[in-house]
Amino acid sequence: VILDDAMSPRSESFRTLRTNLQFLDAERPERSFVITSSVPSEGKSTTAANLAITLTDAGARVLLVGADLRRPTMHKYMGVESAVGLTDVLIGRVALDHALQRWGRSDLHLLPSGAIPPNPSELLGSSLMESLIARLDSQFDVVLYDAPPLLPVTDAAVLARLVGGTVLVVASGSTYQHQVSSSIASLETVGAPLS
């Protein structure tokens, strides 16, 4: 959206979200966020991709991580190869530096999902993931994790408790109030911060 029509109301909404995140609890050292939704097809991956671009346009060094290890789509949105990525780094098959991809000439970097593992939620909640998050936080100004929706699987909630905040994307006119309430409750249950 940002690249196709930079002056559209939708593009401006992504810039507004960027500004809100930039001023959110300025004292907080962690600048990593899980981008998720209640159910599929609410626009979480679109939001993650466009937010990453707007943050980069504002001068931040950004990493967009494909953390949906069940139905990865981030690599399609960004037009990058996904054969090697997050899963491969976590299991030690590939070094982080070899899995990161720079997006064009910008300061936006991508870490696709990589191979689909048999145990996504366990992998995302592991001490290996926690260590990787700390490492990525130290290397980038902002890290965005494009995660699966909250209600079908626990992956996003498990990951959300390890990062600085969660952005819950809600599709206006199609997502039910009880779905949003259940999503917020699942984040509160694991003690995940909701931005």
Image (tube, rainbow, N blue to C red):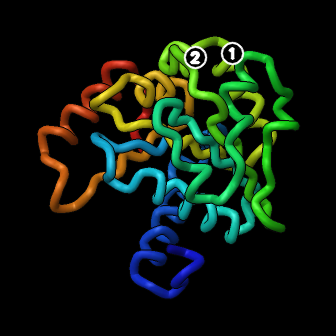
Q: Position of residue 44 (x, y in %)?
A: 42, 51
The amino acid pointed to by label 1 is: Leu
Q: Nearer the viewer, residue 72 or 28?
A: 72
| Label of residue 123 in the image | 2
Category of crowding for the residue at label 1, using alpha-carbon neighbours closer than 10 angstroms: few (below 14), some (14–19), many (at least 20): some
Q: Position of residue 64 (x, y in %)?
A: 64, 48
| Label of residue 128 in the image | 1
Category of crowding for the residue at label 2, using alpha-carbon neighbours closer than 10 angstroms: few (below 14), some (14–19), many (at least 20): many
- For image coordinates 64% across by 20% down, the residue present is 130
The amino acid pointed to by label 2 is: Leu
Q: How many marks?
A: 2
- For image coordinates 50% across by 87% down, the residue present is 7
The secondary element bearing badge 1 is classed as: helix
Q: Nearer the viewer, residue 40 or 182?
A: 40
Asked if 66 appears above or below 104 in the picture, the reply is: above
Q: List the single residue furthest toward the bottom.
A: 7
Q: Is 131 on the left-hand or right-hand side of 43?
A: right
Which-is-in-front pick, marks 2 and 1?
Answer: 2
- For image coordinates 46% across by 22% down, the residue present is 158
Q: Could you give the CA–CA distance between mark 2 and mark 1, rounded to whole angstroms?
A: 8 Å
Say which label, 2 or 1, has the lower sequence index. Answer: 2
Residue 111 in which image quadrant = top right
Q: Is 133 on the left-hand or right-hand side of 191?
A: right
